[in-house]
């Protein structure tokens, strides 16, 4: 997990008064090394940058160890790209890349110096803190004696001059979000054999006790009494029965500004069922609960920050497996809403468990806004790649609010339509609906339209995180494996009320 023990400080002190063993300068393209760094650091860095042709291009780093023994210092330059294009994402990437270099140099106290005019101290502080903290994540649970040998900095000081008070508040938000993202990553990275539905429900209840959330877990009998035919149908092929988790946060001593419901798809392992996945696509299917992990983690961040909104987290948890009683293509399920669904494809299971959860949240919570997160369709990855999630909604204001929350969090979201004429593809000859479209085209949109059938008139948005929830390649701050994508967007959405 991330180095949650890392202390983040924001100060307006001049650099000469900060005693650190590592210095990270965030340098714009063709920018100049700050002259107020301690001693001869400015000249050393400037000379080394000139010698090695370092220009401050985005994502590029340069390091220069100086001194020996206790006097040893590590100087690092990280490029943020053109000065006119510096934004939160550029700062997160540069801070993360620089922090990784500092970790390799065994830096314990890292001072971060922006080498550009800071117009938004709070925004800079948050982006830098998130980049540094997220870059420090490692998943070592199963490594035995091969755990990460070099820990990241235990203390990070961000020098921002004026505006430090607002920047300190922003860094506190960054810390809560980064911790929550690391929690979600741990869940997604855990092998499915160690995190079946019942165990994930136990993790959720432990987190609820720690952060002051209310928690309720429904087992198979209670799920049956709730008439959740989709959740029961998907989970019946596994020896690990499904669970349904409801978490709630209510601010203490004040009236909530809004009531929100977040629903996360929690397929703890997805074999595809009888419409089985190929081996190449199955190996990472422990990540099919990334939506539920993001919702659970975001709930803890909301509680940690004490946000003045009422938030409910709903986690339908199941394994999609094969057995003598597993769901078969052609079976008809009766959903909680009363609608019947013909199972055209057992690998389109996520929408079945979400449909019951959305209907439950709609009728039991009656939220002002409802958002679901799900690794739902490969079609969304085809359309948007691994860097972005698709957003569909039954309300334009909700869609725009979610998109803005994503921008504030540094998570890339892209709006997609829900065209009514595509509903015909979901018509079944034997039931009210079928769980896939009649053709392979527009699979993300027909999945969104399927879910829309279960939300009624509640303002709702569906976020398909199938692409960015898991990374097969290394990234400066997302790392490799589970990313925790969606946590930041949900927290920003709650903060927007």
Image (cartoon, grey):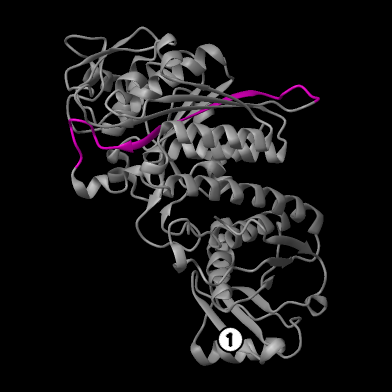
Q: In this view, does 64 lie to the left or right of 305?
A: left
- Is residue 319 or residue 369 the one in the foreground? 319
Q: Residue at (58%, 19%) from the top-left corner? A: 367
- The span shown in magenta is 253-277
- Percent of width and height locating residue 246: 54, 24
Q: Residue at x 61, y 59 (%)?
A: 3
Q: Position of residue 370 (x, y in %)?
A: 52, 24
- The C terminus - image quarter: top right
Where disc 1 sits, the SS reads strand
Residue 452 lies in magenta, yes or no? no
The quarter of the displayed image where residue 341 is located: top left
User: Residue 441's x, y, as percent?
Assistant: 21, 33
Q: How many marks?
A: 1
Does residue 442 appear to the left or right of 225 in the view shown?
A: left
Percent position (x, y) of residue 159? 74, 68
Eyeballing the image, is 429 above or below 273?
above
| Above or below, comparing residue 423 to residue 294 in the picture | above
Out of 315 and 386, give the one closest to the viewer.
315
Q: Residues within 10 Å of mark 1 (few under 14, many from 20)?
A: some
Q: Mark 1 points at which residue?
A: 64
Q: Which residue is drawn at 58% across and 74% down?
A: 102
């Amino acid at each position: 997990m991330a180095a949650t023990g890392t202390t983040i400080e924001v100060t307006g002190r001049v650099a000469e008064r900060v005693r650190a063993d590592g210095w990270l300068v965030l340098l714009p393209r063709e920018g100049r090394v700050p002259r107020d760094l301690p001693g001869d650091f400015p000249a050393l860095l400037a000379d080394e940058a000139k010698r090695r042709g370092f220009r401050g291009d985005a994502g590029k780093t340069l390091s220069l160890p100086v001194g020996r023994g206790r006097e040893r210092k590590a100087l690092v330059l990280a490029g943020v790209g053109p000065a006119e294009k510096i934004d939160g994402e550029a700062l997160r990437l540069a801070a993360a890349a620089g922090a990784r270099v500092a970790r390799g140099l065994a830096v314990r106290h890292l001072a971060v110096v922006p080498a550009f005019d800071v117009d938004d101290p709070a925004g800079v502080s948050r982006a830098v803190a998130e980049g540094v903290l997220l870059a420090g994540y490692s998943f070592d649970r199963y490594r035995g004696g091969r755990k990460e040998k070099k820990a990241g900095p235990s203390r990070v000081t961000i020098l921002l001059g004026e505006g430090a008070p607002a920047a300190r508040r922003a860094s506190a938000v960054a810390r809560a979000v980064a911790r929550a993202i690391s929690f979600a990553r741990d869940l997604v990275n855990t092998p499915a054999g160690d995190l079946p539905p019942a165990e994930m429900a136990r993790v959720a209840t432990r987190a609820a006790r720690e952060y002051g959330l209310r928690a309720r877990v429904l087992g198979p009998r209670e799920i049956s009494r709730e008439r959740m035919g989709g959740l029961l149908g998907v989970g019946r092929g596994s020896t690990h029965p499904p669970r349904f988790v409801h978490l709630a946060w209510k601010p203490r001593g004040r009236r909530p500004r809004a009531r929100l419901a977040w629903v996360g798809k929690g397929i703890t392992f997805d074999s595809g069922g009888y419409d089985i996945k190929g081996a190449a696509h199955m190996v990472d299917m422990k990540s099919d609960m990334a939506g539920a992990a993001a919702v659970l983690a975001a709930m803890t961040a909301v509680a940690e920050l004490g946000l003045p909104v009422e938030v409910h987290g709903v986690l339908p948890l199941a394994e999609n497996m094969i057995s003598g009683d597993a769901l078969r293509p052609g079976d008809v399920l009766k959903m909680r809403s009363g609608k019947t669904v013909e199972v055209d494809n057992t690998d389109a299971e996520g929408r079945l468990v979400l449909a019951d959860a959305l209907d439950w949240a709609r009728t039991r919570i009656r939220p002002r806004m409802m958002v679901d997160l799900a690794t739902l369709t490969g079609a969304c990855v085809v359309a948007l790649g691994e860097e972005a999630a698709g957003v569909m909604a039954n309300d334009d204001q909700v869609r725009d609010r979610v998109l803005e929350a994503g921008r504030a969090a540094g998570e890339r979201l892209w709006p997609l339509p829900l065209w009514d004429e595509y509903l015909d593809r979901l018509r079944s000859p034997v039931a009210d609906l079928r769980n896939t479209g009649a053709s392979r085209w527009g699979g993300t949109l027909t999945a969104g339209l399927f879910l829309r059938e279960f939300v009624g008139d509640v303002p709702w948005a569906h976020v398909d995180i199938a692409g960015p929830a898991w990374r097969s390649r290394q990234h400066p701050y997302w790392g490799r494996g589970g990313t925790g994508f969606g946590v930041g967007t949900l927290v920003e959405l709650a903060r927007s009320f």
